[in-house]
Image (cartoon, helix red, strand yellow):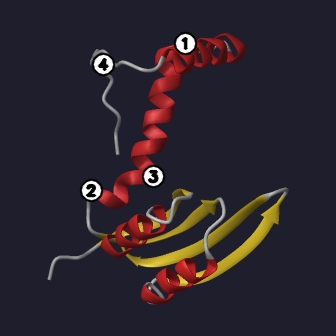
Amino acid sequence: MARSSRRRRFGISIPEDMANELDQLSSRLEIDRSSIVEMALREYIHDQLYNLIEHKCTGLIVIIGSVKHGSLSSVMEEYRDIVSMYNHVHAGNQCIETIVVSGLSSRVVELYKALSSLGCRVRYIPISFSSLEKE
């Protein structure tokens, strides 16, 4: 996908502490704030493409935080058609669940929402995707 060289300017509001952290990061990395925001937004949009266009995808879902085992088990059972691998590890006092998923993006979105409703931090990291051919 070619990136346009044209720039659009618009304002955003963020909490003061986040703005201060952005300023510190900008100074430390010697990169202007706009470039940092652009990089972060590009990464976020890339990670969220599965929400925009129905496609076949493979990705990694990472869950950080304590999840009641029975709750997670029932969600995993409901989405076993797209779950390829599941792993649970401890890092310090944190539980980390990793789930490799592969299937239609709409199913990944449903799983992501179901996992998010369990009260943990959930992140989807896309690995690959392919568009669905029109039949």
Can you identify the residue that label 4 sits on? 7
Coordinates of residue 20 in the picture (x, y in percent): 58, 13
Task: State whether residue 27 is above or below residue 85.
Answer: above
**For mark 1, does the 10 Å Cα neighbourhood hold few (<14), some (14 to 19), or many (20 or more) residues?**
few
Tell me the amino acid under the disc marked 3.
Asp
At a point 43% along the width and 49% down the height, the residue shown is 46
Coordinates of residue 11 in the picture (x, y in percent): 30, 15
Whichever of callouts 1 and 3 sits on the residue coming sooner in the sequence is: 1
Whichever of callouts 1 and 2 sits on the residue coming sooner in the sequence is: 1
Mark 3 touches mark 2? (CB < 8 Å) = no
Tell me the amino acid under the disc marked 1.
Asp
Coordinates of residue 65 in the picture (x, y in percent): 65, 59
Q: Nearer the viewer, mark 4 or mark 2?
A: 2
Task: State whether residue 16 is above or below residue 61.
Answer: above
For the residues labelled 1 and 4, the Cα–Cα distance comes to 15 Å
In the drawing, what numbered circle is on residue 53? Answer: none
For the residues labelled 1 and 3, the Cα–Cα distance comes to 23 Å
Can you identify the residue that label 2 sits on? 52
Q: Quadrant of residue 29?
A: top right
Whichever of callouts 4 and 2 sits on the residue coming sooner in the sequence is: 4
